[in-house]
Amino acid sequence: MRRFSSPVLIAAFITATLAFSAAPARPQTAGLVSATLSRMEKQKRSLKSLRANITMQKYNAQLRDSDTYSGIVLYIPGAAGSASAFVRLEWTKPQQEILAVANGNYVLYRPRLAMAYVGKTSGIKSEKDSDVLALMNMSATQLRTRFGDFEDVREETLWGDVHTTHFKATPKTAASYSYIEVWVDDSGMPVQTKMVEKNDDSTTVRLTNIDKNNSIPMDQFTLKLDSNVKRVKG
């Protein structure tokens, strides 16, 4: 199920980081963290929709090799405290694959196989996916309980000359990953995330050409599949 779970995890991780809030920092970085969290909170409140290019790099620490994927993502947040966000994640390279998430349901369509996996996000059995998906519904208090102080807080310029604030967050309790890193731009948008697993494998996701708060037709989150497409319950 590893290949199946990956795009669902990425969609969930995007949703989680767009709504991310966390614990206070140590005094020497408190000012930078406070300003960053303030921008993130304003961004979260004002975000009505998002369209962006997306790249994902999956690094295999044992092989010291990586695979890179690229495509587009559409996102409309759900009501506060709910898991009803709308996400369309469409990979175009190295091959086409489309994931649509709406109201807690997903459809993962693989055109080359004429196959679609359908199900509820709450029913995903993978430990890693369930752990990251849980971030979607956490309150600020729950997030403060999950993570300790931010680490490695610094300003950093990403390629494309995007100025960001970087921080590392490590779960305080047992989790399927070791830590996450987040890069937040000056508008408060998390434009890059990196999740590092316990075996040092990592997944880095980057958003570029971000277009916020413009209309996205709701039919983008419903996949119309031909009758010859085999449907498999996830």
Image (cartoon, grey):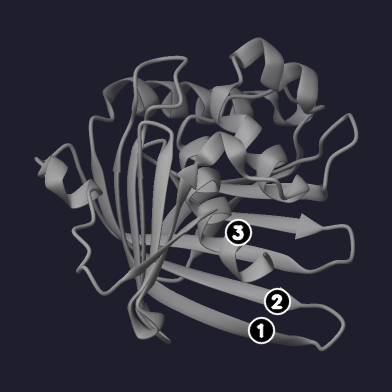
Asked if the residue under mark 2 is in contact with the one under mark 1, i.e. CB atoms within 8 Å, the reply is yes
- SS of the residue under disc 3: helix
Q: Which residue is mark 3?
A: 5
The percent position of residue 77, horizontal first and vertical second, equals 33, 30
Quote the CA–CA distance across marks 1 and 3: 18 Å
Q: Residue at x 67, y 50 (%)?
A: 181
The percent position of residue 119, horizontal first and vertical second, equals 47, 45
**Is 49 drawn above or below residue 80 in the view shown?**
below
Is 139 situated left or right of 23 in this image?
left
Q: Quadrant of residue 140?
A: top right
Q: Quadrant of residue 25?
A: top right
Q: Earlier in the sequence, mark 2 or mark 3?
A: 3
**Is 233 drawn above or below residue 55 in the view shown?**
above
- SS of the residue under disc 1: strand
Crowding near the residue tagged with mark 3, few <14, some 14–19, many ≥20 C-alpha atoms within 10 Å: some
Residue 59, labelled with which disc? 2
The residue under label 2 is which amino acid type?
Tyr
**Is 199 drawn above or below residue 86 in the view shown?**
below
Query: The N terminus is located in which quarter?
Result: bottom right
Quote the CA–CA distance across marks 1 and 2: 4 Å
Crowding near the residue tagged with mark 1, few <14, some 14–19, many ≥20 C-alpha atoms within 10 Å: some
- SS of the residue under disc 2: strand
The residue under label 3 is which amino acid type?
Ser
Is 14 situated left or right of 58 in this image?
left
Q: Earlier in the sequence, mark 1 or mark 2?
A: 2
The residue under label 1 is which amino acid type?
Ser
Q: Which residue is mark 1?
A: 66
**Is 63 drawn above or below residue 71 in the view shown?**
below
Quote the CA–CA distance across marks 2 and 3: 16 Å
Asked if the residue under mark 3 is in contact with the one under mark 1, i.e. CB atoms within 8 Å, the reply is no
Q: Residue at x 82, y 35 (%)?
A: 171
Between circles 1 and 3, the one closer to the viewer is: 3
